[in-house]
Amino acid sequence: MNMILYKNIKNYKYQLLKTYTFPTGIATETNLNIGNPDIKSFVEISRDGRLRIEAGYAWDGPSGPTNDTKNFIRGSLVHDALYQLMREKKLDFKSYRKQADLVLKKICLEDGMSSFRASYVYNFVRWFGESSAKPSDERAEWRTAP
């Protein structure tokens, strides 16, 4: 039987239309990517910390009691990709979560967010974001058809 493998993406608001790279400063021993050899990898981070997010990547944007403003979208993209690397056990969430949260704050400030709001965003993800970074088996969301 000829089957497909798919994932329902109902919880995502945005899809990246052009590949994006960002120097995170998160150095790793090897190049890391999301997924496995049978599944397209949309996110990879090089040993020198350069994060590459492929066109087609979907994410849910800023989380929590906030507005999806232009000065928050790019930061949410990078932050979500880094958290996904942690959920898939590519980056240790205990070692790298704070760095990922600082990257979010840095990008928001670069994009014109006020320092007050950027600090609020940072503190919010520090206080409430741990469960989103903890490792989980995302394959549980995969489906086959027929």
Image (cartoon, grey):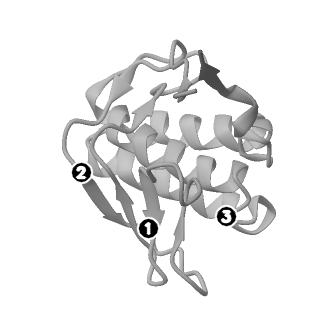
**Disc 2 marks which amino acid?**
Thr
Rounded to the nearest whole Å, what is the CA distance between mark 2 and mark 3? 20 Å
Q: Which residue is mark 2?
A: 19
Q: Is residue 101 visible?
A: no
Rendered residue at 55%/18% (across/down): 8
Q: Earlier in the sequence, mark 2 or mark 3?
A: 2
Please give left or right for residue 106 compared with residue 131 in the image. left
Please give left or right for residue 61 compared with residue 136 in the image. left
Please give left or right for residue 25 compared with residue 133 in the image. left
Which residue, as the protein is rendered here, is positioned at the far bottom? 29
Rendered residue at 47%/33% (across/down): 117
Is the C-beta separation of discs 1 and 2 under 8 Å? Answer: no
Of circles 1 and 2, which is in front?
A: 2
Q: Earlier in the sequence, mark 1 or mark 3?
A: 1
Which residue, as the protein is rendered here, is positioned at the far left? 18
Question: Label 3's element?
Answer: loop
Of circles 1 and 3, which is in front?
A: 3
In the depicted structure, whether residue 70 falls above or below residue 93? above
Q: Which residue is mark 1?
A: 24
Q: Which residue is mark 3?
A: 90
Q: Quadrant of the N terminus?
A: top right
Residue 52: % across, % down: 36, 61
Q: Nearer the viewer, residue 42 or 84?
A: 42
Rendered residue at 27%/43% (across/down): 55
Residue 32: % across, % down: 55, 70
Please give left or right for residue 31 compared with residue 77 in the image. right
Residue 16: % across, % down: 29, 36
**Disc 1 marks which amino acid?**
Thr
Image-quadrant location for residue 68: top left
Question: What crowding class fits label 3: few (fewer than 14 Cα within 10 Å), some (14-19), or many (20 or more)?
Answer: many
